[in-house]
């Protein structure tokens, strides 16, 4: 769970400091840079699992075709990741020399590494700091133009230390039972540190807890990947679990084509970032429930419980829903999602609308206890009727961990961050869950509403009334048309201008 993120020097994130709750909605105009914050989260996630060059190539570019070309030839324009600024003396556009990331996170207490070895964290509230610099390389080596300047993993101070109140620094509305079920640890020594050694920098991976032994040192200049990305349970169990947490941060881009595609019997049982394996994941959840505790008695009835929960969720979006199930075709060995209406007519996934499929995918994720970490989602209102916006927001909030309850299998440590430019969404989001992205001094900054926990406890800047008014009263200028008969310019009448309909509008009409 990502509780705080500081970024500078990355794309148009000049000096960003964002606090996240269990559910966070970021509103902003097109092109303001909302997606760049998601790119920073995804970049950190990729850096915890891949080489520097592979992580850099995965970052989205405004020109997707250019990215594909660079990937095909094994190249990437590393400088495009660095913030651009205008030199005050020469007037030239330059790139920042470094980009800095600082992420505070809550990690699970228990986990396993890539070799199946179990790990237990000595502390669960951590801060990861990473600084990367551009390195000109004419031969284009495996470093790909990125060099690690600083890497650090430390524990955030705990409640047992005087003068600290980490609960107020974590997120809002956390109950003591939630906090105590996940946040603990007394370890004070660093887990990863960077130190100077004569003319070089060494990144050290320290031993954790009872493991003992001297730290493992690596030359920062020659590292093709972060030290965190190569840790395992034998070296540092807490660092390994921090790595696992960051690897679970993902950006969902639910594509209708992937959502409609049937699955084979051997397909993965986790919904992909593009929405693939929806049918296989739902079928797996139903079968897991059917044979829970090794008892296959009344298996069909138990599986129907899962399908019934999904149908109930979907009925909040579509009135005409009777049931949802996954059809198992033994001959073709395929799994196909089907929705049946109240007339008992069944529709396969390929016949469902884009909005319905996206809603179904989110409903399945909400029921899947193994789907943990950070889930970023762009414009979840796409394909959803405005009247059903509350239903999609309710579902997204249900996916996120409930901070009034203990973290458990039925309340996994899961977080949802969305962005939008829809007035309908902004008007429905809770005050404490909203951040507004604005361009200031060439970079994007994130403000909160007054009298919310970010403003009171964290000193986050508050959004102006004028900026918020653009969402709550999205009324543009009256456009004009030319009368074809006499050439006179006349105002173009819009639906919003009809006096007989204005009483139905969710916002007041402001006379100019």
Image: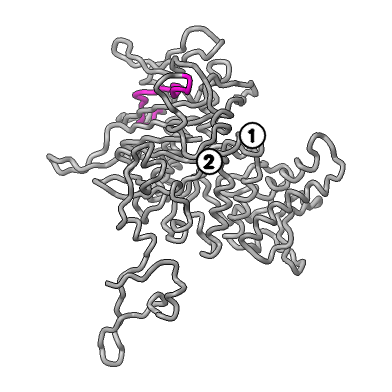
Q: Residue 287's x, y, as percent?
A: 77, 43
Q: Residue 357's x, y, as percent?
A: 61, 57
For the residue pair 424 and 97, the one nearer the viewer reads as 424
For the residue pair 11 and 90, the one nearer the viewer reads as 11
Q: Quadrant location of the C terminus?
A: bottom left
Between label 1 and label 2, give the one nearer the viewer. 1
What secondary structure is found at the residue carrying circle 1?
Answer: loop
**Residue of label 1:** 408
Left or right: 387 in relation to 199 = right
Mark carried by residue 22? none
Q: Residue 410's x, y, as percent?
A: 66, 39
What secondary structure is found at the residue carrying circle 2?
Answer: strand
Name which residue lies at 51% across and 7% down.
213
CB within 8 Å, label 1 to label 2: no
Furthest-right residue in this view:
297
Name which residue lies at 60% across and 52% down.
258
Residue 494 placement: quadrant: bottom left
Local packing at callout 2 (Cα closer than 10 Å; few below 14, some 14-19, many 20+) is: many
User: From the viewer's perspective, is residue 29 above or below residue 4?
Assistant: below
**Residue of label 2:** 415
Q: Earlier in the sequence, mark 1 or mark 2?
A: 1
Q: Is residue 144 magenta?
A: yes
Furthest-left residue in this view:
89
The magenta segment: 143-160
């Amino acid at each position: 769970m990502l509780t705080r993120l500081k970024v500078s020097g990355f794309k148009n994130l000049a000096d960003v400091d964002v606090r996240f709750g269990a559910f966070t909605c970021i509103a902003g105009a097109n092109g303001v840079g909302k997606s760049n914050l998601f790119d920073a989260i995804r970049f950190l996630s990729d850096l915890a699992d891949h080489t520097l060059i592979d992580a850099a190539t995965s970052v989205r570019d405004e020109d997707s075709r250019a990215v594909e070309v660079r990937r095909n030839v094994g190249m990437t324009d590393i400088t495009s990741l660095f913030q651009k600024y205008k030199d005050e003396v020469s007037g030239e556009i330059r790139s920042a020399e470094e980009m800095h990331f600082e992420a505070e996170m809550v990690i699970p207490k228990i986990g396993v590494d890539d070799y199946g070895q179990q790990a237990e964290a000595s502390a669960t509230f951590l801060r990861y700091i990473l600084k990367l610099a551009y390195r000109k390389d004419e031969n284009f080596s495996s470093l790909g133009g990125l060099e690690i300047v600083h890497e650090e993993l430390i524990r955030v101070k705990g409640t047992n230390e005087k003068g600290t109140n980490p609960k107020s620094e974590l997120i809002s509305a956390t109950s003591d039972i939630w906090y105590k079920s996940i946040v603990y640890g007394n370890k004070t020594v660093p887990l990863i540190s960077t130190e100077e050694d004569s003319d070089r920098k060494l990144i050290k991976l320290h031993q954790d807890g009872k493991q003992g032994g001297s730290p493992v040192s690596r030359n920062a200049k020659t590292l093709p990947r972060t030290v965190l990305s190569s840790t395992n349970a034998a070296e540092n169990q807490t660092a390994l679990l921090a790595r696992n947490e960051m690897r679970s941060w993902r950006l969902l881009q639910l594509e209708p084509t992937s959502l409609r595609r049937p699955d084979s019997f051997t397909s993965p049982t986790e919904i992909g970032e593009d929405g693939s394996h929806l049918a296989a994941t739902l079928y797996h959840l139903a079968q897991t429930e059917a044979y829970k505790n090794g008892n296959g008695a009344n298996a069909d009835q138990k599986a129907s419980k899962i399908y019934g929960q999904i149908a109930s969720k979907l009925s909040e979006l579509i009135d005409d829903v009777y049931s949802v199930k996954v059809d198992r075709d033994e001959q073709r060995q395929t799994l196909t999602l089907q929705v049946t209406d109240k007339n008992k007519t069944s529709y396969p996934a390929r016949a469902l609308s884009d909005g319905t499929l996206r809603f179904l995918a989110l409903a399945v994720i909400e029921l899947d206890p193994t789907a943990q970490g950070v889930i970023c989602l762009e414009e979840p209102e796409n394909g959803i009727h405005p009247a059903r916006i509350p239903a999609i927001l309710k579902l997204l909030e249900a996916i996120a961990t409930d901070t009034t309850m203990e973290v458990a299998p039925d309340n996994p440590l899961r977080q949802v961050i969305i962005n939008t430019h829809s007035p309908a969404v902004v008007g429905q989001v809770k005050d404490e869950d909203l951040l507004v992205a604005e361009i200031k001094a060439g970079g994007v900054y994130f403000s909160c509403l007054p009298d919310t926990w970010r403003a009171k406890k964290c000193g986050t800047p508050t959004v102006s009334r004028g900026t918020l008014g653009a969402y709550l009263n999205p009324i543009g200028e009256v456009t004009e048309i030319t009368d074809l008969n006499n050439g006179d310019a006349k105002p173009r009448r819009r639906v919003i201008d009809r006096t007989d309909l204005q009483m139905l509008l969710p916002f007041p009409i402001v006379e100019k």
